[in-house]
Amino acid sequence: MLRTCTALIALAAASPALARPLNPAEIAQVDKLVAKTLADTGVPSAEIAIIRDGKLVLSKAYGKANEALPANPSLPYQIASNSKQFTAMALLLLEDEGKLSLDDHVSKYIPGITEGDKITLRQLLSHESGLQDFWPQDYSFVDMEQPTTPQHIIDKWAKKPLDFEPGTRWQYSNTGYVVAGMIAEKVSGEPLLTYLHRKIFDPLGMTSVVNQDDTDTPAYPAGYKRNALGPVRVAQQPGRGWLYAAGELSMTAADLAKWDIARMNRALLPADDWIAQETPMLRSDGRTNGYGLGVFNIYARERHIIDHGGEAVGFLTQNTIYPDTKDAIIVFTNADFSGATGTLTEGIEKIVLNSPEPALANETDRAADVSAIYDSLVSGTVDPAKFTPNLNYYFNPTTLGDYRSSLAPLGKPTSFEARGNPRLRGGFVNRNFTIHYAGGKDLTLVTYAEPGANGRWEQFMIMPE
């Protein structure tokens, strides 16, 4: 039985004219999406938080947190690698305090690390250090059955030969964040979690934050695993100390939302620290994948996104911020299998956020018309009245012959998949498609047409995908 616990958040600090709380229809759609996703994947529970217009508008939990505890939005989930942005921010704040520089070399603080005189602290945080990742697997390996220490992780993995010259490549490295955490503790003179509480969690009222090592009890969500399509089972948690500065935090989605809101507003911390964290790092060849210092800064689904995911034993999380509109979607699950966090993030995005580009009124993808035009080109029965004078000029006998002779052998397309919404250009409506064929062959179709359901076609160009 799916059990839910809801907490609609009052928007006391916002101007009523600017606040857009979720309406009942939107909440019902979110509920339906989460229920279906949990049922489809077997994930035991999800905890979500939604920020709209810079305000928390929904905090809700679904399913079972463990075998004896229904999910509720006051329960901290392990956020795993979403912890990295806090470790990175700790180093930025320590730089503000004059206790270190991100351009310092690792060897200044911790001896014995391979080529520590070449690796900068900035490269630790941006995954450009070359240090071998101690946990690339999606399961806990045998060493993780026993407790560990940051120094043990460094001794076993950070003293191996580098995987590449610092700054030349990007490779996700939990090891680099263990080193960063040790440096933060050394220069601050206090445990990393204590420093974060003092500088970030306590000022923001993030009261749920605890070390994930302390959450393996019946009072907290259990992590679950699944072997192939077998039964969903409670996962054995690793020994203490393995996640440390790379992923040691547990908190509620509503508390992580407080951090996201501070990011949107450039609040609590210096604005230049927020900006530095979000600025994509360039490798020595000038390329970037959008990763800054503990977060990605990317464009996806026609939106500007600051985000990060997290995976721990039995837990997956996703924190996605849309800074241009001050929206965010946070999804926690207590399972380390399936793509539920991505499904929920993108599904909630479609329900509660404004369309990145308003759809054109009275314009559809005209997929049936596109299919008919395609068939006429292959069969040689083109109706010139459906084309503008320009397109009739383009489709001269040579062009028509090339279309027919090259496309006919491919057979009937299996589908025409619209790529994005119709959009205006040059007085015409642009519609783009992927044409799928049996056997996996795909082609691209770029069209322009006069506005309206019966507008004549100005362009109908097919090319390799």
Image (tube, grey):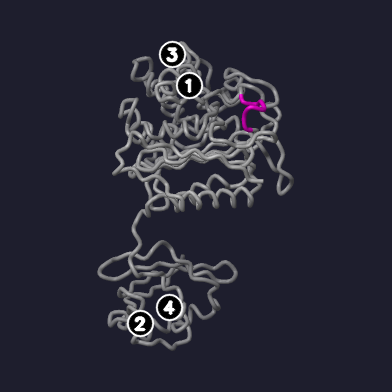
Count of numbered labels shown in the rendering: 4
- Residue with the mark numbered 1: 116
Q: Residue at x 31, y 76 (%)?
A: 458
- Residue with the mark numbered 2: 395
Observer-side mark, 4 or 3, equals: 4
Q: For mark 3, give the secondary structure.
A: helix
Residue 23 vertical placement versus 365 (above, below): above
Question: Please, what is the three-letter code of the amino acid marked with disc 3?
Answer: Val
Q: CA distance from mark 1 to mark 3?
A: 17 Å
Q: Residue at x 42, y 31 (%)?
A: 259
Q: CA distance from mark 3 to mark 2?
A: 71 Å
Tag shown at residue 103: none
Measured as percent of width and height from the top left, residue 404 is found at: 46, 82
Q: Is residue 218 magenta?
A: yes
Q: Residue at x 33, y 82 (%)?
A: 387
**Of residues 38 and 374, which is closer to you in this image?**
38
Question: Please, what is the three-letter code of the amino acid marked with disc 4?
Answer: Asp
Classify residue 307 by image quadrant: top left
Answer with left or right where residue 248 lies relative to residue 393.
Answer: right
**Pointers 3 and 2 in contact (CB under 8 A)?**
no
Measured as percent of width and height from the top left, residue 189 is found at: 46, 11
For marks 4 and 3, the one nearer the N-term is: 3
Measured as percent of width and height from the top left, residue 366 is found at: 41, 73
Question: Please, what is the three-letter code of the amino acid marked with disc 1?
Answer: Gly
For marks 1 and 3, the one nearer the N-term is: 1
- Residue with the mark numbered 3: 187
